[in-house]
Amino acid sequence: MEKNVELPSAPHFAVETESREPSPERVLKMVRYVVASVNDDALQAWSDLWEQLRPGVTESGAVLPELQRGFTPAAGWPQFLEKFWLLKHYLDYVERFCKQTQ
């Protein structure tokens, strides 16, 4: 038993002509992920700095006499100051990023 099947002369593909721009909600979600990531790095830098300063400061924020006489970071000055520059870099990045997305 033979069946005659007619084949199309050319394949037909659906082509989407509209650009697929992300929705405003999706853009906001992406912005939040970027800012959250940079913020996590900034908080970690702050935490590292605070860990070195904390032994010389009371819970109420008063500076103890040994810290008033001088402070030497346990990891050394180069690493300590590098953390300050990283913190500034992270904060600058978040500021520029937020101003660009307005």
Image (cartoon, rainbow, N blue to C red):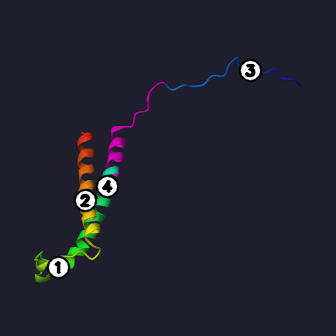
Residue at point 12% right, 76% down? 60
Camera sees residue 17: yes
Looking at the image, the residue that sits furthest to the right is 1
The residue lying at 23 percent from left, 48 percent from top is 95
Instruction: From the image, state whether disc 4 or disc 1 is nearer to you.
Output: 1
- From this view, report whether residue 2 is shown above or below residue 28: above
Could you tell me which secondary element the residue under label 1 belongs to? helix
Q: Position of residue 51 (x, y in %)?
A: 25, 74
Badge number at residue 85: 2
Residue 7: numbered disc: 3
Q: Are marks 3 and 4 in contact (CB under 8 Å)?
A: no
Mark 4, residue position: 38
Seen from the viewer's position, the closer of residues 93 and 34 is 93
The disc at residue 56 is 1
- Return the x and y of residue 90 as percentages of the image width and height: 27, 55
Q: Is 23 a magenta residue?
A: yes
Can you give x and y, in whole percent of width and height, for residue 35 in the image?
A: 30, 51
Question: Mark 3: few, some, or many residues within 10 Å (few <14, many ≥20)?
Answer: few
For residue 14, side relative to residue 40 (left or right): right
Q: Is residue 23 above or below residue 14?
A: below
